[in-house]
Image (cartoon, rainbow, N blue to C red):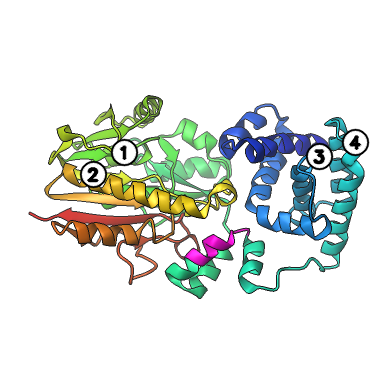
Amino acid sequence: MSTRTALKNSCDCLDSIYKKGAFSNVTLNEVLNKTPIEDKPLVTKIVYGVLDNDIRLDYYIRQFAPHPSATVLTMLKIGAYCITGLNLPSAIAVNDCVEVLKKQGKAGLCGFVNAVLRNISRAYEADSLKLPGDPLKATSVKSSLPVWALKKLRDDYGQAAMLSFANHVNVPSANLRIDTGTNSVDEVKSFLDKEGVKYADTVLPDALQVFGDVTSVTEKKACVAMSLAAMLVARTVGVEDGDNVLDCCAAPGGKSVYMANLCPTARILSCDVYPHKLKLIEGYAYKMKAENISVKLNDATAVNPQFFDKFDKVLLDVPCSGYGVIFSRPDIKVFRKQEDVAGLAKIQRQMLSVAKNYVKKGGTLVYSTCTVFQEENGDNIKWFLAENPDFELAEPDLPLHTAFKDKPGVQLMPDVHGTEGFYMAKLIRKI
């Protein structure tokens, strides 16, 4: 393994993310395709580790360089993470970062980077890296969650819940959804045993938590990687035989396909506003042999009279701030801004106002997000129910219960349930 190759490729990836706003997962995959196989794990760990600890690393750097050059800030963060997060020998981490900079044509800044990283290393080894005196700012640095997000969590759920969320340490794993119509759970477990991959049961009979690479099993068995929380959203819809079901914002298709597999006699219409995303849904449906799905180009923010009173079940999985999935998508912590939340809540209410028209009397509308902020979750449902007295809130039949009984709907929390932080509310249109 070449540490320098891993550092260079990590720097290229992070520069694209920081400076161009590129999607972390897409950019990382592109970089990994050019990375020697022995260096891929380290590149992945560095990229996600730097993003996940961005505020903390930036704070450490500015203790020794209050105004670091933007030209080398990414490499400073990588070096600081290697020292404080990966516990690489400081001499190797500092020296390799400097050598990579030389190859990038930045030899004039090598002395500066060398000095800053050595100061961080000495302070880290002496346990003298300081945190802010303000408790909230200190929590922000330790968790790399912005202060505005911590304040929202505190306002929504209280100090203890905010700290629990901020201190949560994610266990690296993936959830595996098994198509039990094609292969049994026991068959998949036997396959994983032979591959030497560890797993555990979950609250759902057709899902496993897998601690390792799921590529081989998804290639050879009828199963896919799918968030347990996303599966619970699909189950909240409660699709039954003969139902006409609309998935308003369906791409990339996971929930639509799961509903189709759960109830092959239902008719699922999966919609999205982008044509290329409809092709993703069709490809996913084909892989999982979901033949009861059709796709349609449709804008969830605009009323479509053709859909009025047509569907027994409607799933509205809205665009959101994504703060429930930050442990697997750390770039959200870096780029999401406080003002985004209010703008998204406005769009979400518009979508709710549109989707309600598509539900038959006696039918179900499920609203869901992958965030933990009440402004996008319970507040929207309170508003909707006040504006639409012909709808009422129902209790979903789920094996997990909401973390906060005083809030409408079901809020899953990573630190409470061990799932991603999804929200779901089941609404019934009165007869």
Mark 3 — residue? 3
Q: Are marks 3 and 2 in contact (CB under 8 Å)?
A: no
Toward the viewer: 57 or 327?
A: 57
Q: Residue beneath label 4, please? A: 107
Disc on the earlier residue, 4 or 2: 4
Q: Is residue 240 visible?
A: no
Secondary element at tag 1: helix
Segment tinted magenta in the rendering: 144-152
> Quarter of the image holding residue 28?
top right
Foreground: 289 or 400?
400
Location of mark 2 (residue)? 355
Q: What number is the disc on residue 256?
A: 1
- Of the numbered discs 4 and 1, the one sitting upstream in the chain is 4
Q: Residues within 10 Å of mark 1 (few under 14, many from 20)?
A: many
Asked if residue 148 is among those painted magenta in the image, a careful observer would answer: yes
Q: CA distance from mark 4 to mark 1?
A: 53 Å
SS category of the residue bearing label 3: helix
State the residue at coordinates (86%, 47%). 113
